Amino acid sequence: MVRTVIAYLFVLCILVVLGLFALIFYRHACAAGWIGPVSSSEPAEKPMRIVVSMSTTPSGIDKLRPTLDSLTVAQKSHRLPDAVYVHVPQIFKRTGEPYIVPAWLTTYPGITLSRCQEDDGPITKLLPTLALESDPSTLIIVVDDDVIFAGNLVQMYEKYARLYPQEALTLAGYGNDTDINEPNWLGKVKLSMQHHVYMIMAHGTFAVRRAFFSEPQFSSYVRSLCQDVSNRCFVSDDLVISEYLGQRGIKKRLLFQVDFNYYYSLKARSLHQGADRLSSIENNDVKYAICHRALKLRPLPHQQL
């Protein structure tokens, strides 16, 4: 009996000593920063700055209200963007028409009206925003002006941007760059949900990080390609942006309308429906193929990769 008690006491002493050593080690580890205190809740995610970027045409500028409503008022129940940029050049280069800004647009709540001295073509929907936003982590949602969006647009992109922080995201995209040389390639492409694609399309919206673009090098690259309105790259902004991202090694993920719905409004003023007075002459297959060949002849300078 005595031996049993002694054995129990011996074991108890060993456990106490081990416990003291564990406590001393834990305190030392905390002081050294090796481990942190145990918390019952997960740390809050860092707020993400999200902005929406778009441009318009002289014929479309006074018809923007439904689109802007869907980007501001309709987003309130989910997640409002931190800014909505509407970039408006002085002159629409494709036709020479001046922009007449309606009075209601200058006071529309929740948007930033950005007047541009130069019209860089459809890529004006993105280019000026790169000068206005400097934080590399900012998410830029690029949209067309002829679409009405569901109220969870911003929330949806925030969700997937956290899942895929190093990728461009889109709700409309196409194949790979070898497809472009095939006749009617746009009509032949079939993609599965959340597939990586070559080209992202603003008519379905896309989202990119500010860090994906080196400025002012990207703007210079674009303007060297697109000085002339007759240049097919001038009206192939989706292709120019996609090729640039691809050359920088940035993957482009097609979300295929995950958790989201949108629909077109006022199709007659869509640039891809002929409002640019060039798309009506040739289809996108031809336009993209010509621009694609030009892009392959003008790879990015090494310092931009």
Image (cartoon, rainbow, N blue to C red):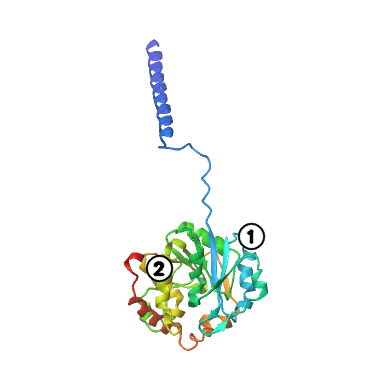
The part of the image, by quadrant, that contains residue 51 is: bottom right
Kindly identify which residue carries mark 2: 217
**Picture coordinates of residue 301 (x, y %)?**
33, 69
Q: Is residue 181 above or below residue 53?
A: below
Kindly identify which residue carries mark 1: 77
> Which quadrant does the C terminus fall into?
bottom left
Tell me the residue at 63%/77% (across/down): 62
Determine if residue 198 is in view. Answer: no
* Label 2: how many Cα within 10 Å (few below 14, some 14–19, many 20+): some
Decide if residue 61 is on the left or right side of residue 196.
right
**Picture coordinates of residue 208 (x, y %)?**
47, 64
**Picture coordinates of residue 258 (x, y %)?**
52, 65
Q: Nearer the viewer, residue 291 or 219?
A: 219
Specify the amino acid type for callout 2. Answer: Gln
Q: How many labels does the image show?
A: 2
- Between the residue at mark 2 and the residue at mark 1, the CA separation in whole angstroms equals 38 Å
The part of the image, by quadrant, that contains residue 78 is: bottom right
Decide if residue 65 is on the left or right side of residue 300.
right
Tell me the residue at 65%/65% (across/down): 109
Q: In this view, does 204 lie above or below 40?
A: below
Q: Which of 65 and 76 is in front in this view?
A: 65
> Which quadrant does the N terminus fall into?
top left
- Of badges 2 and 1, the one in the foreground is 2
- Mark 1, secondary structure of its residue: loop
**Picture coordinates of residue 131 (x, y %)?**
49, 65
